[in-house]
Image: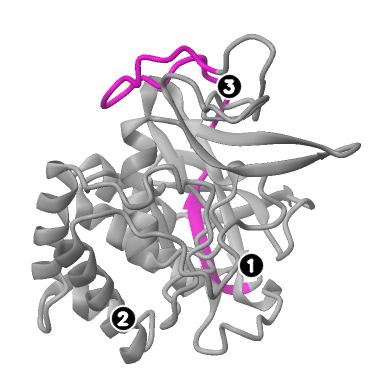
Amino acid sequence: MSATGELEELLARGELRVVGRIREASNAVLLCSVAYGGVSADCVYKPVKGERPLWDFPDGNLAQREVAAYLVSEATGWGLVPPTVLRDGPYGEGMVQLWIESGAEGSASGDGDSGDAGPPAGESGDGSGLLALVEGEEAGEGWKPVALADVGEGRTALLVHADDPRLRRLAVLDAVINNGDRKGGHLLPAPGGRLYGIDHGVTFHREDKLRTLLWGWAGEPLTDEAREVLTALAARLADGEPLATRLAELITPVELAAVRDRVADLLRTGVHPRPSGQWPAIPWPPV
């Protein structure tokens, strides 16, 4: 069994013990420990009973969408979402996800270095080295512009993100799963140069709901790597394939069809999507 498979088994079959609650979250998010076969880890448990109803996501629950996002991430081979399972817990069925220890990083290393050592002096970052507010209208070398932001007292600053291959992969994944809430706080740089994205409950809507801080590549050609990954993903989403069968258990038939359409559209256009103009392009609050 692979290391990922072992972690999935730990999360799915281990004894789940609640340690505390993460109060900053809008839905019930519980910090837990899980133990199985002499192995233990920290994890996050989001019970379905603790979800607040969303008017625009009436079909299914958010926990199922979190698991679906993980499965699609794994199918790309990029490993951008921490191991995630759907299981019963102390407060009923919910999503259980491996806890990722994250901290500030000074550079965009890992599977491709951006060549930039974080926000230049005098600029404000988000603590991850991946986002910054820049005075003026130029993003600067190694950075991609997103939008002008109101910083108070009649002042604006340019919101930028790192021109980082890991973020670019995440932008492609978000386009596939139709992520309606890619905030800065959902980016977790991990030891060893890994980058994870979390909080994928607001995903897989049948309509275009993409809201993200990662618009820096909008309209630019997809990388060769992304096109290869999307081509393989399209095949795995075909009827009868294991990924498609599992996704059909987690999201509605219309939503699954929409995933296939989004992958096909990305391959047809060959570019990163642009904001639709029919939905706010940037989540609020952005961090």
Q: Is residue 219 left or right of residue 234?
A: right
| Cβ–Cβ under 8 Å for marks 1 and 2 | no
Q: Nearer the viewer, mark 3 or mark 2?
A: 2
Question: Mark 3 or mark 2: which comes first in sequence?
Answer: 3
Density class for disc 1 (Cα within 10 Å; few <14, some 14-19, many ≥20) is few
Q: Is residue 41 left or right of residue 123?
A: left
Residue that badge 1 annotates:
90
The magenta span reads 92-118
Three-letter residue code for mark 1:
Pro
* Magenta-colored stretch includes residue 105: yes
The mark found on residue 255 in the picture is none
Colour option used: one colour
Q: Separation of disc 3 and disc 1 at Cα?
A: 33 Å
Q: Is residue 169 left or right of residue 206?
A: left
Identify the residue at image location x=38%, y=79%.
Answer: 250
Identify the residue at image location x=87%, y=39%.
Answer: 154
Q: Is residue 225 left or right of residue 181?
A: left
Residue that badge 3 annotates:
104
Up the image or down, 282 lies above or below 208; here it is: above
